[in-house]
Image (spheres, rainbow, N blue to C red):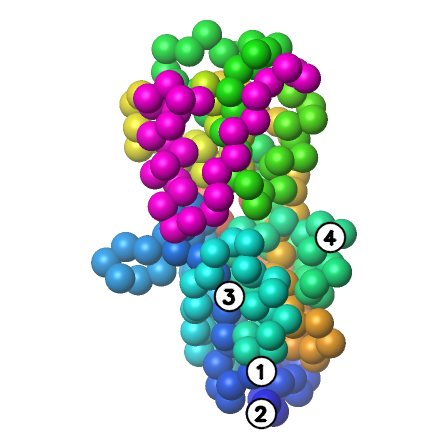
Amino acid sequence: MTNITGVQNSTEFTTVASGELRIITSDISVLPMSFIRDGERQGFEPALTRIVCDRLGLTPQWFSFPLKCFYSELSSGNYDVVWFNQVITQERRAWADFTRPYGRFDTAILVREDAAIDNKAHLSGKRVGVLQESVNTRLLEVLPPDIEPVYFEGSNKVEVEILQALRKGHIDAIIEDAIVLMAAEAQDAGVRVAFEISSQHPFGVGVLPGNRELLEALNTVLTSLIVDGTLNRLWGQWIPFKPCPF
């Protein structure tokens, strides 16, 4: 591990590889948060990552893994952070030290355009698709008790598989982050967001436990991006249909 001097407060911190931030991520397409187009990572999170790394004098290096492997891979010591739509939870804090939140997001329900579903009660007896590794599995508890959860494993094609299941009638609804489902609605006239659930999940960067200096450096930059308006401008570029929470 090599010492690197960060900007802002000149705090020294270490990363696994000199001059790099080795990032555990996924190739799952979750517009507008993160997706790959023309061989390049795009979206709110990759754009934010590049700005943070630039201020710290680091080059971001992304490594894609199945969602279920994120924290075991972080524990290997070969990577610096997990940075991919990670809600900060107590369970995940057992595996990683988290930065301050850089976003807060609600949850929503996506249905077919012609479905007679407009509120929670209408989901009674329905099949609801959910990403198996998602924190949103907890929100199934606030839905009618007779729903039938249908779990989808977080492979790189899960966004295609779960939407196809909805279109073909194999499931009746999808529960996922609201901004992701709003983006799906905007691209597909056959589906619509039925309603939202106020969850305000905080998203953060999971840092290899014990690397307090890197955690402090990331927090310093994230705070500066909020204070100087950079985060707000970035949010407006990628998520214009939702107000920035900071």
SS at mark 1 in the image: strand
Residue named by callout 3? 24
Residue interval drawn in magenta: 144-171
Residue named by callout 2? 2
Determine which quarter of the picture holds residue 122: top right
Residue named by callout 1? 15
SS at mark 2 in the image: strand
Residue depth check, mark 2 versus mark 3: number of the one nearer the observer: 3
Q: Nearest the camera: 161 or 36?
A: 161
Residue 36 in percent (x, y) is at 32, 55
Residue named by callout 4? 91
SS at mark 3 in the image: strand
- Res 246 seen here: no
The Cα atoms of the two marked residues, 4 and 1, are separated by: 24 Å
- Queried whether the magenta region covers residue 151, the answer comes back as yes
Q: Amino acid at mark 1?
A: Thr
Residue depth check, mark 1 versus mark 3: number of the one nearer the observer: 3
Residue 204 in percent (x, y) is at 62, 56
